[in-house]
């Protein structure tokens, strides 16, 4: 039986086939690579993957007898709460991180507050606190830049260590893609795809989440050219439970196709989920939840990332065609192309944090150091050089945890060749970088251009 609500959506349960994600107690790199990286398929991995994380000891508390029934009564999504999850250990978080400034989302509005202020609001148990979600908190980076000396609160699982993005950003910049998320039941992240179709992995240290996952083949059915997604009007979050999903949605005629491919998974405490390249996903906290997340990439999804960059570049350029026309008129004798390229790339970097220089330099760094990437250090000054893997949240790559060089080169060359022959690759700013890549790819005598 189907029910129509006031927004023109029909809700149905019986006709929806519940797709599932493979759940494994643990997984070898070989199995993870062949079944999930190569096939670009999600997987949920059990607590054995993170059994040695320090944050499991320090960040978890327990619900009191008074708190547990109250939490169940406050659950507006009618979720049956399990006793197999923890409460956050706010006392520890305040003692160690209370003065750190964290990014906070409140109903889509971003601000910054001290963690102490956020926890005080959460503890007040008012309506405002139930909407505050600490998102994209670079805690590992803050600790590495600070004078704090403590054991790392986690280390990257070895199956995820072939990470071009964080290898590059931590070696060459003062930024990274390692995050902590903290928020009460009901806080959520809207439907989205990760930056330039990067992978993500996410581990629940405290609490439980629900994920809605959509494979790349249905992207056109859940997004529009203007960036709108089918999740923008709370379509998924408002369904109430994993089995009840709207059958039809006004304005989205192909939603039933996407719905049939959709995967809904509930991630338990201690579990890690791998979200493949290009998969749109939305996430809801079913309890108070603390998770550790990475965006990451490597040679397996490089082609997808490259073409995502091509699409993003074209979108930016299409949006400022009037600027291009002005430059052409002003420079009737030519020479406007370099200025046009610079303007477009600056806008691209402002929009997403990357431009072509970033992607090419990322490839160069990971071709140079695929097996012996320098270990991270807490500080970059000479006095701290002895601080190596013992104080790092990321360990150097294991040769057995990355594909062989031929695989990497075969994935990279077609994309770099396409770029070198494109109008972007002909820009003078990339000449030296392309030459270095030619040498690293063994293509010095057979130039990409």
Image (cartoon, rainbow, N blue to C red):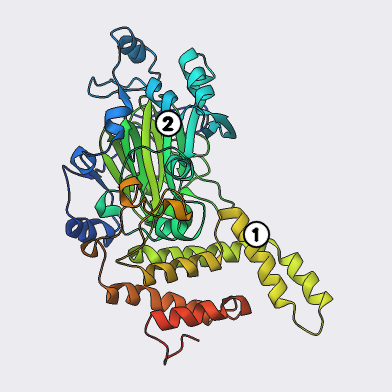
Looking at the image, which is closer to me, 88 or 36?
Answer: 88
Reading the chain from its start, which is encountered first: label 2 or label 1?
2
Residue hosting label 1: 347
Residue 100 rendering spot, x and y as whole percentages: 51, 32
Disc 2 to disc 1, C-alpha distance: 31 Å
Residue 438 rendering spot, x and y as whole percentages: 44, 82
Q: Is residue 46 above or below residue 341?
A: above
Q: Is residue 210 above or below residue 300?
A: above
Q: Nearer the viewer, mark 2 or mark 1?
A: 2
Answer whether residue 336 is visible to the viewer in this image.
Answer: yes
Give the SS element for disc 2: strand
* Left-right relation of 221 to 286: right
The part of the image, by quadrant, that contains residue 41 is bottom left
Q: Residue at x 31, y 10 (%)?
A: 69
Give the SS element for disc 1: helix
Residue 119 rendering spot, x and y as whole percentages: 48, 22
Question: In which quadrant of the rendered image does the N terminus lie?
Answer: top left
Looking at the image, which is closer to me, 250 or 102?
Answer: 102
Answer whether residue 220 is visible to the viewer in this image.
Answer: no
Classify 10 Å Cα crowding around label 2: few (below 14), some (14-19), many (20 and above). many
Residue hosting label 2: 182
Looking at the image, which is closer to me, 436 or 182?
Answer: 436
Residue 421 rendering spot, x and y as whole percentages: 53, 82
Classify 10 Å Cα crowding around label 1: few (below 14), some (14-19), many (20 and above). some
Q: Residue at x 71, y 66 (%)?
A: 321
* Left-right relation of 213 to 97: left
Q: Is residue 417 above or below residue 234?
A: below
């Amino acid at each position: 039986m189907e029910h129509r609500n006031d927004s023109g959506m029909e809700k149905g349960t019986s006709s929806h086939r519940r797709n599932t994600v493979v759940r494994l107690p643990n997984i070898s790199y070989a199995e993870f690579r062949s079944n999930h990286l190569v096939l670009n398929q999600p997987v949920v991995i059990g607590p054995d993957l993170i059994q040695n994380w320090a944050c499991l000891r320090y960040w978890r508390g327990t619900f009191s007898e008074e708190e547990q029934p109250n939490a169940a009564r406050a659950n507006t999504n009618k979720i049956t709460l399990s006793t197999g999850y923890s409460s956050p250990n706010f006392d520890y978080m305040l003692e160690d991180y209370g003065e750190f400034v964290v990014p906070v989302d409140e109903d889509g509005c971003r601000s910054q507050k001290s963690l102490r202020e956020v926890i005080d609001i959460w503890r007040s148990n008012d309506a405002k606190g139930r909407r505050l979600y600490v998102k994209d908190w670079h805690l590992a980076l803050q600790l590495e830049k600070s004078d704090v000396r403590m054991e790392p609160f986690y280390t990257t699982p070895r199956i995820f260590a072939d990470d071009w993005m964080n290898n590059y950003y931590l070696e060459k910049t003062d930024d990274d893609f390692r995050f902590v998320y903290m928020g009460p039941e009901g806080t959520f992240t809207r439907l989205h795809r990760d930056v330039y179709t990067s992978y993500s992995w996410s581990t629940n240290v405290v609490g439980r989440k629900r994920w809605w996952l959509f494979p790349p083949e249905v992207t056109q059915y859940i997004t529009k050219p203007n960036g709108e997604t089918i999740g923008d009007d709370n379509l998924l979050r408002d369904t109430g439970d994993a089995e009840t999903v709207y059958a039809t949605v006004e304005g989205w005629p192909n939603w039933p196709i996407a719905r049939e491919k959709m995967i809904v998974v509930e991630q338990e405490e201690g579990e890690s989920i791998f979200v493949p390249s290009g998969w749109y996903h939305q996430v809801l906290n079913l309890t108070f939840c603390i998770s550790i997340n990475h965006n990451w990439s490597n040679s397996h999804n490089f082609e997808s990332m490259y073409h995502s960059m091509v699409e993003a570049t074209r979108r930016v350029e299409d949006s400022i065609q009037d600027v291009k026309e002005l430059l052409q008129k002003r420079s009737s004798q030519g020479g406007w192309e370099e200025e046009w390229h610079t303007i477009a790339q600056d806008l691209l970097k402002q929009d997403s944090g990357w431009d072509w220089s970033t992607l090419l330099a990322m490839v160069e760094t990971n071709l140079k150091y695929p097996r012996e990437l320098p270990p991270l250090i807490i500080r970059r000054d000479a006095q701290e050089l002895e601080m190596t893997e013992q104080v790092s949240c990321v360990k150097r790559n294991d040769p057995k945890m990355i594909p062989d060089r031929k695989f990497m080169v075969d994935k990279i060359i077609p994309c770099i060749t396409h770029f070198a022959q494109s109008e972007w690759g002909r820009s003078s700013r990339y000449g030296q970088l392309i030459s270095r890549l030619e040498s690293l790819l063994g293509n010095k005598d057979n130039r990409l251009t």
